[in-house]
Amino acid sequence: MSGGLDAPMSTPHVIDEDSFTLAANLPTGPVPVEPYRSPEFFELERERVFKRAWLYAGRIEMLPEATSYFVKNIEVVKASVLVTRGKDGQVRAFHNVCSHRGNLVVNTSCGKAERFVCRYHNWAYGCETGELLGIPDQKHFFEVDKRELGLTPIACEVWEGFIFINMQKSPEVSLLEFLGPFGRTYANVPFFNLDETIVIEADFKANWKLIADAFAEPYHVPSLHPATLAPGFAHPEQNRYARPLSARVHGIHRHFSAYGNPDYVPPPSSKVERLVYIQDTGGVLGGDASENAAALAAHPAINPTKNPNWSADVTWIFPNFNIDYSTGGFWTHEFWPLAYNRTHWTLRVFIPRTASVRHRLQLEHYACRWGEVVLEDVTNCERIQRGLESGAKDHMILQDAEMLIRHNMRVLDKWVKADTVAEALR
Ligand code: FES
Ligand SMILES: [Fe+2]
């Protein structure tokens, strides 16, 4: 990447043939920042992106049995979504809104129920198709047809155990069409360690894209995470700026593969890390040596260049969802806008059931490491929001490793302008 001592000072140092940005057919100029600070643009995102895109609602494990349900409140589309598994095993979604006078029917976040009873006047709905089962004192209503007064359905489809919903009454494209090449490339990735989750969530005074951007490039690793991540994800000689091993677009979605320092071992001063590291956690992100990890690493989509110095893959499903993979398992990020300058973020790290005290210690260490690292990431976002809102800068200058951010801004621009989803997907 270095231009050498005799390169003119003003010459860009990106080497064309290695450029992720050029390979993705993206322009290389400055990118406008107005979409990060404009309330008007946020309303466009609400109407044209979040009300038309397929949105991640939860994992299939959140509905372990027939009659399981969970509720997902999605502020940006002003909806309370009830996701259920019927006795027939089918996953469905409904507006969590009573047909009588509009009360929210279910007020618990998850559970099991054969009937959902609205507490206001006890109208009751079935868990199968949201059908209206009963109206107390029905004879004093006027011409009600119970068959037409069930819960209002929301389009819901499942891909690889990930449940997505779509707020369009009749979605213009299916989930598979929406996922496009991403759905095909990442089909059949073996997911594992699904027993439990470590969940970290918080609200930030920052645009949702700033939180998403925080996890979209490794260029910041040496500077923002000098003590926590840099030793394992950069190399003082071979990869000082943690350049990704690959970064590609998959239709409207995208990924990058992160480098892992093959020489990294915890220093003697990191006593707890050494204790857990010598166990089967092995690699830089709690990787293990199990068959699961080997199967994951062998999948053609994961670390697609099969570089031996691989640590993790970050995939960003448009608009606001990440599925990330390492040999230790996988984790997801959700970036939910609350306002143009406020975001609710949820990180879910999927972990196996604890097998021993030592294993528990490993997982606790893993969770603490996560907490430490992501705090470095997300607390920085509020500072960026303030910087951008000052109006001092109208553009950001992105380097090649920040290609995913550039691609997101381009796709977003297309979605807010396109009259149809088919057009937005082109
Ligand atoms: S609003 Fe639900 S029963 Fe009246
Ligand atoms: Fe980071």
Image (cartoon, helix red, strand yellow):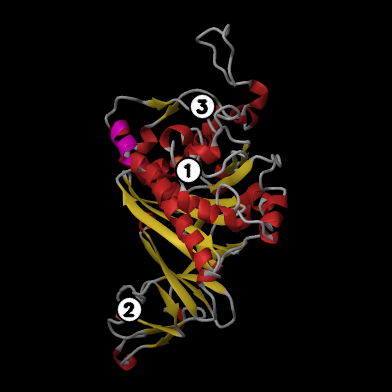
User: The magenta stretch spans which residues?
Assistant: 381-387
Picture coordinates of residue 386, whole percent (x, y): 28, 35
Q: In the image, 62: left or right of 183?
A: left
Picture coordinates of residue 308, whole percent (x, y): 69, 41
- Pointer 1 local density, CA inside 10 Å: few below 14, some 14–19, many at least 20: many
**Tag 2 or tag 3, which sits nearer the N-term?**
2
Q: Label 3's element?
A: loop
The residue that label 3 is drawn on is: 399
Across the whole image, how many numbered discs are drawn on residues? 3
Residue type at mark 1: give it: Phe
Judge whether residue 68 can be spotted in this image: yes
The residue that label 1 is drawn on is: 215
Question: What label does residue 322 carry, if any?
Answer: none
Q: State the CA–CA distance, disc 3 to disc 1.
A: 15 Å
Q: Is residue 92 above or below residue 233?
A: below
Tell us which disc is closer to us: 1 or 2. Answer: 1
